[in-house]
Structures are given as C-alpha cells and as structure tokens.
Image: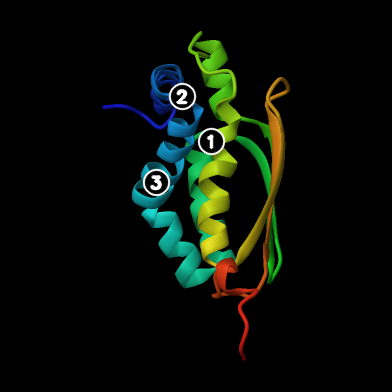
Amino acid sequence: MITALDFFGVYCATFEYIERTYGHEALEKYWAEYIADRFLVHLDALVAERGIEGMKEYWGHTLEEEEAGYDITATEDSFRIDMHDCPALRWLREHDRMTYDDYCAHCPALYERIMNRNGYSYQYEYDPGAGRCWIEIRAVTPGRPLSDQGSAGG
C-alpha cells in the first residue's frame, strides 16, 4: 500500500515524465483536466457545499496526514495556509526523489481552478528552497463561480 507520504515521489516522477515527453503545456493540461477536475472531486464538493468550512476540513485532515508544519487562519470569507515545512519537499529531498524542479507549481494549478469555479479567488507565494509557501483564498461571491462575475444583465 502506498502511503500519503510515498505518493509525493510518484507525483514528482509523473510531472517530470510528462513534461520531458510531451512538454509543459501537456503537464498543465494534466494538472487541470485530470487531477483538478477528476481526482480532487472531494475537495471540489466540500468547497461547493461548505465553503470555508469545507476547506478547513479538507486541508486540516490532509496536512495532518502528510505531517506538514503549517498554520491555518480562517474567517467567514477567507482561508489561509502558511506552510512552514512542506511535507512533499521534505520527503522528496530526504529520499532523493526530487526529479521535477518546479514541483510546487502543481498546487496553484490544481487549487486555483477549483476555488475559482466555486466563487473564490486564490493567491499564493512559494519558496521551494525553504520549503515554505502561503495560499490565501477569499470569497468573491460565495457560491457563484468567478466566470459569472462580469456577466451583463441583472
């Protein structure tokens, strides 16, 4: 059985293979259309149904399972993770499995897509060398996808 921690190596090797074999555009398509749209359906459903509370449930469980060093701050219309010790980067380096240099890029590629379609903005900054990042998610119009925000009519 593969553990959550072991999965980091599978992800990293997969990203490297897809980009080397098919190019960066194919990797971005893989992140969006396969992982975000087909694999992260649990997160998508939690955010659609429970908003910020769903985010707290998802990441609270996931980051504990992955043994991350983090802080979560949440209000009625915002959610923030400050990652002090990224479990993926730690594991990849400790096990000499860092095969894809821009490993961190998959997080915004996955999560921004899900948040936007559920009416949230997504900002981030990451420092792979230090194993740190932050993400901040804010309600634009809860329950209303960003693609509907600028439409005419009323």
Q: Report the Cα–Cα distance between label 2 and label 1.
A: 15 Å
Point out the image quarter for the N terminus. Answer: top left
Drawn side of residue 30 relative to residue 124, left or right = left
Which residue extends farthest top?
A: 96
Disc 2 or disc 1, which is closer to the eye?
2
Q: Report the Cα–Cα distance between label 1 and label 3.
A: 12 Å
**Is mark 2 in CB contact (under 8 Å) with mark 1?**
no
Point out the image quarter for the C terminus. Answer: bottom right
Q: Secondary structure at mark 2?
A: loop
Q: Residues within 10 Å of mark 3 (few under 14, many from 20)?
A: some
Which residue extends farthest front?
A: 152
Q: Residues within 10 Å of mark 1 (few under 14, many from 20)?
A: some
- Mark 2 sits on what residue? 23
- Mark 3 sits on what residue? 33
Q: Which mark is residue 106?
A: 1
Q: Report the Cα–Cα distance between label 2 and label 3.
A: 16 Å
Drawn side of residue 89 relative to residue 20, left or right = right
